[in-house]
Image: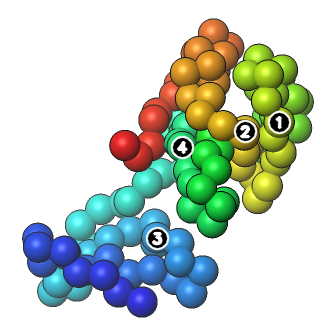
Amino acid sequence: MSKKNDNNYVFSYNSEGEMPKHFFDKSGNFIGNVNKSNDGFIRVQLDKKSRGGKTVTLVWGFNETADINTICSELKKKSASGGAVKESKIEIQGDKLAVIEKYLLDNNYKVKKVGG
């Protein structure tokens, strides 16, 4: 599936609806990388999609050596909320962006907020 914007860039998604790692202009010329997954930043995002209108805070971008289950457990305690690890992403119930960002910064992670 392709989506076109006003800048004449064509963004192509794979069959799972994920963005590719590179993007090209309308002529097929390589422009750059969309998002480097190993750039050292932890992404934090609020999400409501396919959740019945309920908000969750998504956290991802940890390296392979990080114990995501332990980090998830700590985030659940700090935010006084439920959560789980799904597909290498931590999902914390509710809008806990500020609490999670503070915890990650206090533990020497570089954080980027994704979305609005």
Q: Name the amino acid type tagged 4.
A: Leu
| Distance (Cα) linking label 3 and label 1 | 29 Å
| Image quarter of the C terminus | top left
Q: Mark 2 or mark 1, which has the lower sequence index?
A: 1
13 w.r.t. 71: above or below: below
| Distance (Cα) linking label 4 and label 2 | 10 Å
Q: Mark 3 or mark 1, which has the lower sequence index?
A: 3
| Distance (Cα) linking label 4 and label 1 | 15 Å
Which circle, 3 or 4, is nearer the viewer? Answer: 4
Q: Name the amino acid type tagged 2.
A: Ile
Name the residue carrying label 2.
Answer: 92
Q: Decide if residue 66 is on the left or right side of residue 25.
A: right
Task: Measuring from the top left, give residue 76's x and y in whole percent.
Answer: 81, 28
Name the residue carrying label 3.
Answer: 19
Name the residue carrying label 1.
Answer: 82
Q: Secondary structure at mark 2?
A: strand
Q: Are marks 3 and 1 in contact (CB under 8 Å)?
A: no
| Distance (Cα) linking label 2 and label 1 | 6 Å
Corner quadrant of residue 93: top right
Decide if residue 29 is in sight here: no
Q: Residue at x 79, y 55 (%)?
A: 86
Q: Secondary structure at mark 3?
A: loop
Name the residue carrying label 4.
Answer: 46
- Who is closer to the viewer here, 95 or 67? 95
Task: Measuring from the top left, give residue 11's x and y in whole percent.
Answer: 32, 77
Decide if residue 69 is in sight here: yes
